[in-house]
Amino acid sequence: MKFIPRHIPVKTGNVYIAVMTEAAAHSFDLHEGDRVVVTNLRTKKKITSILEISENHLPDTTIGILTSLWEKLDLKRGDRIKVGIAEKPQSIQYIRKKLDGGVLKDNEIDQIVKDVVAEDLSNVEMTYFVSGCYTHGLNDKETISLTKAIVRNGERLEFKDKYVVDKHCIGGVPGNRTTMIVVPIITAAGLKMPKTSSRAITSPSGTGDTMETLADVKNDAEELKKIAKHCNGFITWGGGVDLAAADDKMIRVRYPLKLDPEGMLFASIMAKKHSVSSNTVLIDIPYGPQAKVKTVKAAKVLGDKFEHIGDLLKMNLRVMISDGKQPIGKGIGPALEAIDVMNTLENNEYASQDLLVKSYTIAGTLLEMAKKAKKDKGYEMAKEILESGKALTQMQKIINYQGRKKFCGVGKFKKKVNASMSGKVIEINNKELARVARIAGAPKDPSAGLWVEAKIGDKVEKGDLLYTIYSNSKEKLNNVDDFCNKDCAYTIKPKK
Amino acid sequence: MKFIPRHIPVKTGNVYIAVMTEAAAHSFDLHEGDRVVVTNLRTKKKITSILEISENHLPDTTIGILTSLWEKLDLKRGDRIKVGIAEKPQSIQYIRKKLDGGVLKDNEIDQIVKDVVAEDLSNVEMTYFVSGCYTHGLNDKETISLTKAIVRNGERLEFKDKYVVDKHCIGGVPGNRTTMIVVPIITAAGLKMPKTSSRAITSPSGTGDTMETLADVKNDAEELKKIAKHCNGFITWGGGVDLAAADDKMIRVRYPLKLDPEGMLFASIMAKKHSVSSNTVLIDIPYGPQAKVKTVKAAKVLGDKFEHIGDLLKMNLRVMISDGKQPIGKGIGPALEAIDVMNTLENNEYASQDLLVKSYTIAGTLLEMAKKAKKDKGYEMAKEILESGKALTQMQKIINYQGRKKFCGVGKFKKKVNASMSGKVIEINNKELARVARIAGAPKDPSAGLWVEAKIGDKVEKGDLLYTIYSNSKEKLNNVDDFCNKDCAYTIKPKK
């Protein structure tokens, strides 16, 4: 079947897409999502592509070729192409097996991950895989296979150090920027800590977003190796490197229904640690009514599973269960969190004590796990490193090596939220607080967010400041009004 | 967010697609598959669209607009557009519920089907729905809800007759063109039989394809009403009318993994009957090693379910279990089946006796169900109608009303397959026979296919003709050779 190619200027990464009319597809018995081999008849170059069907907009003798395929085939005006049917990738049968409740073998999971990375699976096919994993779960062996397959089929940063340290927090707590305190402490202690963080998806800021107000976070693998050599570590956004590439692609189809199949969650977290060679890892599981994990009991169950998976991966892994009932620190939103972090690293009068305590606890545990500190001496060592100013110096060094950025400051408009009555703060709704920060513009506007003054247990008088909202848009600040009730996100128990 | 629209010439039916660069999407916190409201700032017209992300090929200030959206928004060169975030359709939460194993309520299923028809659900979201139905099944109530929702949200052909007759065959048997014999008999008897058939997906021909060699099968609803008025019925392809539109769209995402969730299969078949007002239905379930249903036992189980669903829908429904071990009739492939059907309607010396017997059985049962024939007298009545020539006359009338086509004839190249030994035919592999017909070019080339001479039980001498393959391509005939072993698809038990 020979056709005239027509260039369609949409670039789709490594997914190669050809568009055929309904009539042509019907006459060749082809269906949307079928794989076809497209050959440039001048150069004889062949590329397997995914077929999309368009409603008779192009002539039947013409095939639309999206930019990535057009470039890969070196197509030029006047070229002719041939289209033939391609075999389905082998992994389709394994996806079907998982959807039918089967247990996948090591090589089967590897093939799926390979095809995901090669963009040989369509979104619909990947969705069936996610569905299968979600409905039937992944057993331990499958989880380990998936973890290893993700690492094997992605980029890696190799470090030969005996201890490569990492931490991970099962999110849901605003302002929880311990990473930016812990990495300076640990790397100042001479340990390797190559930390990749995510950006916000549904929160007002991820560590990637907060760090980005201070430094470049899109460093590539080469740069990261150099930074780690000079600074013992970094705080970067994972997306600049193709670590765990398969995971990023599968997240694309998990996003529409916000699905977190447990086995995939483990594999995703563990693969990211493995791909930067981490072997000494602390998992922080905050619990609270608005955190991802609601109760201590659920946190313990999840923690046990993490430890079990860690054992199977021969990783030195510990779990810490923490209080996720209220924000940690004072800032929420990229710039405001960055200010909070820098105050805390400086240990000045504005330093957030709760952020300090949590960071010492995490850093202390990691120092003990990596045999830098004796048992029960880690917390003290972490505190000493911070109080000596070494952690701050280390953070400045990391910022300089990643590429210092001009700080954007906080939003030019602000709005104070004051207590509507006198009494005691007994509850703070993290989700609502995060929503206020997002309505104010975070994380798209890094200057937007809020600064928390009152925490749970604080006694407040009527009119006392609970928190201040910052935004660069008056309209957005007004939108917050529409949303907020009195004491927005706060519950105050009145004085008797 | 204001943007410059750029037209991307791909037409996607009623799915409206806007393409944003990765960088722009990131800065607005948008993800692939998000719904956005696109507004033409000149006309203020707004359309909810699905967002696709392209890798920085367009400038960040430009948004690619696919043809359907471009036209719907009346966009012109120089226009500017605004993009805002749209709410997710409500049905997303019901899809999630099904995927979590929940039982969907009537209104929830209706909302999903409504959103499917309105193209408000992306392929990934529809895939999750199919996965949920596949893994957790649909109970009777859900199946009925789905059936009714598909009918409610699609086009309908209303007939007021007391009996509107229909038949359906659970495929897998080549050459099984009883529909084209039964419809002429039933309509000649004065009963209404508005028959919509499918085209081949994996077989060498569907009734839609076979009928199309004789008459137009793409008639729209208006035409079909007129044809039914004059002829009491028709034999058309369902795709020309938007009957069961939701079903067609869901089949799109079932296709890549060839998933047939049972509840969806029932709903699909029943909705198609309902949408043409059928109330008197015979379901033919052939069983055999290569049919969709393998054993009598499995056929009975499926039959019971059909009868149960029929009861719940207050449909007069009967099930017939038939032998699907070998082809019915002699022709396989569109034109060859049409020849076979016309010979049989003419009841001439080439008429296929097995096709006649099966057609009389089906038509007879339907005549009894619709009270045209007394109990056990239907078969005889069907036979009389055919033998009198009335069915043939009726078929010619239907062909003329649908729009007679010039018959293409059989392929100009042929190849005979002869018995390699003397003995008795004890098995015919339907799947292999179908594959031979497809390799020869069917159904793309309607002249391609084969003509079967020997059936199970026939005694053959070495060199006797088993079947003849027809094709318009010598190359394709040679391909058959590469594939065929001796006695291709036939098993002959040698004489002792």
Image: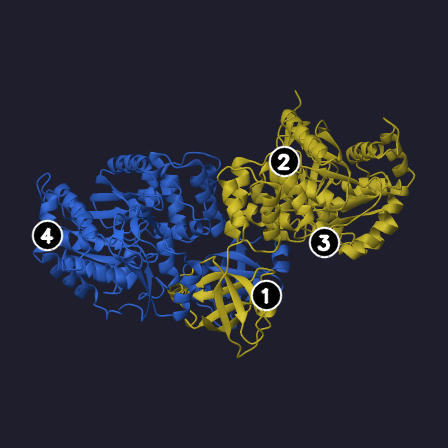
Chain colours: A blue, B yellow
Left or right: residue B191 compared with residue B448: right
Name the residue type under label 3. Val
Task: Please name the residue shown 39% across and 70% down the image.
Answer: A474
Residue nearest the viewer, comparing A288 with B293: A288
Is there any visible trace of residue B431 in the rendered image? no
Q: Identify the mark at residue B385; answer none if there is no mark.
A: none
Q: Quadrant of residue B119?
A: bottom right
Q: In the image as oriented, which residue stretches furthest toward the bottom?
A: B78
Q: Quadrant of residue B307?
A: top right
Disc 1 crowd rating (10 Å Cα; few below 14, some 14-19, many 20+) is: many
Structural distance between the alpha carbons of marks 3 and 4: 72 Å
The CA span between labels 1 and 4 is 59 Å
**Secondary element at image label 3:** loop
Whole-percent x, y for residue B106 in the image:
62, 42
According to the picture, the residue beneath numbered tag 2 turns out to be B141
User: For residue B241, which numbered disc appears in the image?
Assistant: 3
* In front: label 3 or label 4: 4
* Circles 2 and 1: CB atoms closer than 8 Å: no
Amino acid type of the residue that numbered disc 2 sits on in the rendered structure:
Lys
Q: Is residue A104 above or below residue A337?
A: above
Q: Earlier in the sequence, mark 2 or mark 1?
A: 1
**Label 1 chain ID:** B
Disc 2 versus disc 3: distance between alpha carbons?
27 Å
Q: Earlier in the sequence, mark 2 or mark 3?
A: 2
Query: In the rendering, at what x and y percent does residue A304 appear?
Result: 28, 34
Mark toward the start of the polypeptide (3 vs 1): 1
**Residue identified by numbered label 1:** B68
Question: Could you give the CA–CA distance between mark 3 and mark 1, rounded to whole angstroms?
Answer: 21 Å
In the image, A207 versus A263, the foreground residue is A207
